[in-house]
Image: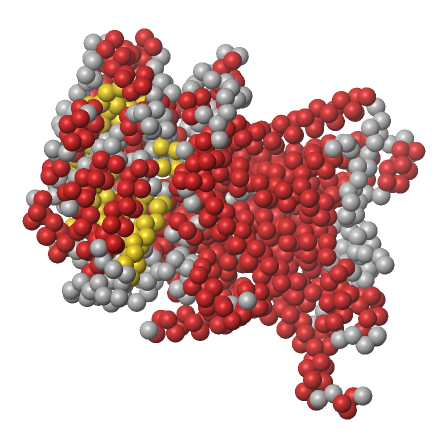
Amino acid sequence: MALSVPRSTRLTEGLLNRERPLGYLLLTPALVVLAIFLAYPFAFGIWLSLTDASIGSDQYNFVGLQQYQYLFTKDHIFQRTLLNTFEYTFVTVIFKFILGLLMAAVLNVVYRLNQFVRAAMLLPYIVPTVLSTLAWQWMFDPTYSVFNWTLALVGIHGPNWLSTGHWPMISLMLVNIWRGTPFFGVLLLAAMQTVPQDLYEAAAVDGASAFQRWLHITVPTIQPVILITTLLSIILTFADFQIIWILTHGGPVNETHVLATYAFQTGIQGTELGTGAAISLVLFPLLCITVAAVLWLLRKE
Amino acid sequence: MATAKGVDTPEEPPEGLEERPVTVVAAHLRPRARVRRPGQAILTILGTAFFLIFMLFPFYFMLIVSLKPNNDLYNLHANPFVLTSLTLDHFTYLFTKTGFPRWLFNSILVTIVSTVFSLAVSVLAGYSLGRLRYRGATALGWGMFITYLIPPTLLFLPLTAVMARFGLLNNLWSVMLSYPTFLIPFSTWLLVGYFKGIPRELEESGLVDGCTRLQAMWRIVLPLATPGILSAAIFAFTLSWNEYIYALVFLASGDLKTIPIGVTNELIRGDYDYWGELMAGALLGSVPVAVLYSFFVEHFVSGLTAGAVKG
Amino acid sequence: MKRKTRRRDFLKKTVWASAALAGGPTLMELIEACGGGTANNPQPEATVNFAGGGEIHIMQWTHFIPEADTKFKELTSRWASQHSGWKVVVDIVASNDLQTKTSAAVLANAGPDIIQMEYNWPWLYENACVDVTDVVNRVEKKVGKFYDSIANQAIVKGKWLAVPWAYTPNGWLFRKDLWSQVGKPNFVDNHDDLLKYGTQIKQATKIPVGEALGHAYGDATTMWYSTMWNYGGQEVQKDGKTVAINSKETQAALEWAVQMWQQALDQTGLAWDDSSNNKAYAAGTLSATLNGASIYINFEPGHSLANPDMLSKTSAAVPIKGPKAQSTIHLSFAHAVMKWAKNPGACKDLIEYLMQKDVWGEWLQAGGGYNSYPNGAMDDAPVWAKDPVIKQFNDSVKLARWPGWPGPPSKNSSKVQTSYVIVDMFAKAVQSPNDIKKILSDTEGQLNGIYGAPA
């Protein structure tokens, strides 16, 4: 039998049957795509951030870390932006987590129309963010705000959602929470349903209250999912662009920028490519630190 | 034959990314807790109502605005919650006076190509990282995960220059090739978890029977991983369908725009927005993913959780 | 040619994996089919060569009045029909996104052959624009010199880098019924009166004056730059280097703004974009606003907000004056031929064709008088004779200045504009009226940073 198989075929088969060559081979397409369209531009971005390149002029100089130095020491808008990014991420992730947990608890009980309810609640997360944010923009409209129309019915003069005081930031966070809650809700629900039912029954027999059962059985079991969901949410929220860009463009007075929108305004609209690249790259170490912290928590488990 | 669903992950030693013994989620989610007391029932109803209203109100509002005649829409005294008269003008305008049909086609094309491409690549990579043991697998797995930390908002500036160098700007290939940069890391990561959950013995018995490894992968492992692949596909489809910043920067021509770009580019007219048409476009742009999810929500959830809990 | 080879090589390598999915042999066709046909091989030519045909892509903003877009496309195809084998494609982009696309194209060194640039973009994208002095010379010979306010934005270092195309002038739109109540049926002509009578109307009817004070690139810039100038303030000296913002004059402008804000303006203005005052005015919640004519034109029969009642109540007036000046900014457009254009000669010919008075006049008519020619050559157009309200907008063209005035409209002045330094100065002042001195010195610091003077 073996003799009838050409040598080359045997060699190929041999290679393909060994885990190591096959492993590298199967990984190659992914690595090629990521190398060309991700690693290379990423490295190029780092290089740009070390120069004073600007769009529309051919010459540029290597300036070392001057862009970063300028941002951190002189650019007040950047400093505000950095704080905003943290505030935006921190506040919304907490709310998304709490609301998501409640949503999961509710969905875990509802059983009629279950599939409909679950699909409906997932909508904010799955439809194009730009499009749903446009609906919010109309609801926040200074003239036609449906919220203010409703408040006016009971004699309250509604806030200027996207203009004064803390309202712009609150409005942006509200939309982000609206979009992100279902992500938590549905993932936590799925995790909750993996908790073996007999654990609850045993605990109930032992006289544990619903809250005790939740705290001592549900939470420990779903903890890995909680951490991973939070991690993904942090990454996505840190890098958010669409909601802010559509609703405020970073205004009023550059008060609601996050790193992504400020990088866009500086790099593309302001044509300061080098500065823009530096602003967006600040995201990266921040994300790495956050992710390392969450993974450390996971491992400690 | 046992499927991946509902089977405990085998007690393999941690290899590559952190592995933890958890139950892979059942594909058909069932409500587990029963309503026992009236108080709980009321709380549940109130909770459901709260979330349904909070989550769906913007869509209700989109629908109302898209059907409202302009003189009601811009009338401050008209009740914004209800329709007193109804018009299809905004939809007609969308289909006859804008490139909406073309944007729809582009969105579908771009989404399908980038999803299929990313998935094919990710299945191979996921299999490699999840089931094969070789030196460097751990590092490569980590590297793959770290790429997920480079979001589009960080990449679009240099990527524009790269696309330009390849002569791909204002060409649908620019987005079809750049979407995989965020689809592949995520899908691979998700699939690694799924592949790891499939017992090794199944595949090994196939190898003993004379299959090559690729045959074993194709005939034994992939069918078992179908739910995972499906949920990765749904996820990839959604991310491509919703993508904004790359398409915004890379595509300029009217006949190349995707829905989010077309709608925001051509219906926001300087100092005058076409709200009825904007909302009609937003609604129609949301329908395909909404339909997809109403059919596959269970798969999406179970696959995502299975991938996620793997760590 | 080299470029092309490289591109093919690259595609072979990277797209190889997707070839099977996309249908292997037809891959190159697919790539072509997915493209917008952008040009990569510039062949600068002295004389126009129409032989062999070709395609010209023009990128421009979404016009306020959709009919103007349709007409523009019609006019360009008419040019194409006169040259066999030629085709013109008009790519339309939201005004907010136009600069994004322009930057991407310049970065890419590929994209539309002609970009309809706004304000002083020729200064920003200096190295990407072809010298079009020859076209301007020919056009000016026929129609006379272009106004300084548009010429200065297109002439960079002695060369025309874009051919002025149009102004979109601003003026005050006001409610005759409300302003008659305070004895000003023809509106007011200066800042003090705007404050005084605007306040009276607000007290009597609760209806404020409205203007954007957010990051609205058209309205906010127009209103607050002109306020600064009208009181004698300026961001920089004529040399375009010495920052001059911290002055008694600017302070006076800020103080007026604070009073205006507290007494007469709609306080939601901080979040307004360019569409907000249109919506508010249409809803009847503003007594007056500084804007283009779009609000008025959209009330006319046949337009989307047709409203005979509001149309009859609305009139227009030219921008108001302050103690030192009567000034304004208008959105202005100029056609730049990009250096990657395949056939710059044909592009120039197309632009020259569009500048002819009768051709341009058709476009003006389609837009309902929303635009003005870059000089007085079209002042006798029938649209304006027909409607004295619309004519006010054309009359205000002469009052125009440019961001960075009296310095040249440089890259720096543009950065000041796009980072909203002046607008934000006003926004901060109305939010903390007690800190005006500090706001002035902060703004001075920001401007010094931009204009490069020692901090």
Q: Nearer the viewer, residue B18 or B278?
A: B278
Q: Where the N terminus of chain C falls, by quadrant?
A: bottom left
From where the camera sits, is residue C9 visible? yes
B266 left or right of B109 in image: left
Q: Nearer the viewer, residue B38 or C167?
A: C167
From where the camera sits, is residue A247 visible? no
Residue at 50% over, 25% down: B86
Residue at 28% over, 12% down: C178
Quarter residue A176 falls in = top right
Vertical comparison of C204 with C309: above or below: above
**Residue at the bottom extreme of this rendering:** A3
Quarter residue C357 falls in = top left
A143 left or right of B52 in image: left
Vertical comparison of A24 with A158: above or below: below
Vertical comparison of C244 with C326: above or below: below
A73 left or right of B307 in image: left
